[in-house]
Image (cartoon, coloured by chain):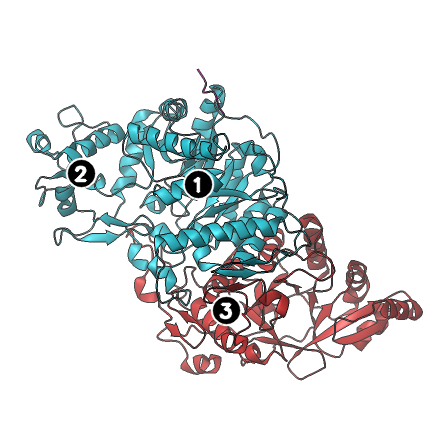
Amino acid sequence: MRSGAYSSSATIVGYHLSGMDLTGPSSELVATACAVEKAGADYLVLPDRTAAMPDGASPPTALIAGAFLAAHTSEIGIVVTAATGYHEPYSLARQIASLDHISAGRVGWFADSATDAASDANHRREGHDPAAAPETRALEFVPLVRDLWDSWEDDAFVHEKDTGRFVDPAKIHVVDHVGTALAVRGPLNVIRPPQGHPVVFARAADTSVAHHADVLVSDVPQQGHVLAVEPFVAADEAAARELHAAAGSPAGGDVLVGTPEQVAAQLRARHVLVRFTTRAQLVAFTTHVLPLLDKSAPTGATLRERLGLPAVANRFAPTQDKELIGNAR
Amino acid sequence: MPADRELHLGLMFWATGTHQAGWRHPDASADAAYDIELIQEVCRTAERAKFDFAFLGDRLACDPALQHSNPAQISRLEPFATAAAIAAATTHIGVVVTANPTYSDPFGVARNLASLDHISGGRAAWNLVTGADAAAALNYSRDQHWDTQKRYDWAEETLEIARALWDSGDQPINHRSEYFSIDGPLGLPRPPQGHVVLLNAGTSDQARELGARQADMVFAGPQPTLAKRKEYYADIKARAAKYGREDHVTVMPGLTPIVAPTTEEAVALHDQLNSLIVLDPEVEVGEVVRAGGIGEGFKRNLVSASEAFGVNLRGNDLNAVVPAETLARVSEDGRRRLAEITRLTRRTADGPERITYADLVHATPQQLSHVVVGNPEEIADEIQLWLEERMADGFNIYPAYVPGSVTAFTELVVPVLQRRGLFRKDYRGRTLRDHLGLAVPAVR
């Protein structure tokens, strides 16, 4: 994981929507996001599927649902999942950068290097077999996306009406990445995102991308990591146990079972990513558990500030703090 | 007398304006490319005027050297993300995204388009481009750019796969070919429009054939003469007829309306915009400048103008009037350009308002679309002429600058078109197919 400690002391709560049915009308998703935003959750993670779900419909592309939600919300962070095996880095870098502009700096990318046979079988084309060396591609992918985000310095887009200078070409840089799996020249065709780098999330176990992420998610408590939790909340403990038993295969993470007070007391990390298997559980957690947590007002407008993460220096900017750049590489 | 068919209107959204110096107009939003609220507001303006769609162009490379010749080509928000944000802020207007199959995989593009169609309630369209752009190849781990035939073969097969995926339900498609191995199914419900609306541009034989056989809307760069416009329209319809699609394909050329309440004000606005163009210094003869997306273009100086008009114009004051005897010596192509200058500026070689050297410079590079300068009735006359003379079924409106040119057209011209019975006063339905009068295709 990249350097930078969390500076905030309040509890940070992200919502992971992976287990939920997101196939309904877009108005349902908007209503959920707005309710969760109002209740004070810090961010949503939108899942993505590059193959049909075995047992039903898949959600819309996370990048598109994310842009739609960004337009309907004003504070909550929006983290979109995108797999390194099934995207092109240039396209993904500009999509995430564009989302960051659209949301005024509220976006994160949940990088995922996992591949699966069903997705591989949907993405074979001349010159690309996603099943061939996906780790090599993933290892190059995240640093390359970060370089593309840096290809415009913060003040390269000058648009000076009086002089007619639209951009400053000296502050727009090629990336010239030539790796084993990927070759991308750049520059990106989007100006630098408001956050510099949108926040990069990864599973701690996803070793091909974890080293370059800002935020790591673990299923067990670990210093400096976000803890994945799966709550089963009900008015009384017995009902909560029944919910847990009925859930069958859990989504993974720390399972929390009990009344709202018990679940709030069981949180074993200051930053948790809550996975929900049903809309009812999302509503129960939001209504009854979230108000019990120490949720001070967010410290910044961007997701990066809200999570207490440091700003990222631009690797191409000539007079930046070299030590910071060194840490970021 | 109104034409026998309904006019369609699209908004070609370029944040810089489609005029090279549009972003420098005093009322223009110079950073509109990254101002999503302004983009949404511009689309709501078009929606209030009952436009069929807003159109988002794209290019998969960044070349800062284009900043004076074609600044819109340097950078922009990514079309799918922008389209989703536009969909969130509107209720009826269609949203066209540009996607180039050469640099995307069929499953990804099918999934993005289906997602956009779902999230917008059936308002998505795909501008399928094959982009002859060597710079893009370098951003997509390719060491060479493919030739035209391969790009078209790849694009048409991508389209076939995308439509099969939209129709796939819970059944695999198991597409196998030289280029692709795609199992499916898509995993998303069938899009509300069945197949998202398809646009295709171009004048080459391959482009016309693909458009006639597959597209719901086609458009092309500006044709220099009335005869060529009619020929293009007739050719598309004749080709479409081979496939029983002549009533199905809408021909939508680009149109840049420079409109103001009076002709004099419109001409002044056109002059003002041209005066904001940063000209190139007079250097080597024959030097060309990359124009990005529209191929090579002439530089903007009297060296290039001398070539274009076939007379030596170098070293003159740009604001000076060109002597009539000089204009009498221009080449045949130069005479066509002079007629175009008079059409736009109302200035002539010997009239009360005379052609200047600057006019010759501005008439040298290729225009992006057909420009028309005038009062609202004059603009409406031109639109009606194209419709009735079968040169167009509608227009992609190219606003010279934003948001001013969009509001000018919607407030001044659209009411005239509606009063003449040429354009709808309200939407008939909620989907883009509804606006175009196209049925949802059956599952194949």
Q: Earlier in the sequence, mark 2 or mark 1?
A: 1
Specify the quadrant of the image occupied by residue B328: top left
Numbered label attached to residue A197? 3
* Whether residue A77 is situated above or below residue A163 in the rendered picture: below
Q: Is residue B336 visible?
A: yes
Nearest to the eye among marks 2 and 1: give it: 1
Question: Which chain letter matches label 1?
Answer: B
Q: Main secondary structure of the magenta part?
A: loop
Residue A258 located left or right of residue B93: right
Q: Are marks 3 and 1 in contact (CB under 8 Å)?
A: no
Label 2 – label 3 distance at C-alpha: 47 Å
- B69 within the magenta span: no
In the figure, the shade used to draw chain A is red
Determine which residue is flagged by label 2: B360
| Region of the chain picked out in magenta, as a range | B1-5
User: Which quadrant, please, contains the N terminus of chain A?
Assistant: bottom right
* SS type, badge 1: helix
Percent of width and height locating residue B147: 34, 56
Question: Which chain letter matches label 2?
Answer: B
**Residue closer to the observer: B238 or A130:** B238
Q: Label 2: how many residues lie within 10 Å, few (<14), some (14-19) or many (20+)? A: many
Residue at (41% x, 51% y) in the render: B152
Numbered label attached to residue B211? 1
Looking at the image, the residue that sits furthest to the left is B325
Mark 2 vs mark 1: tell me if same chain: yes
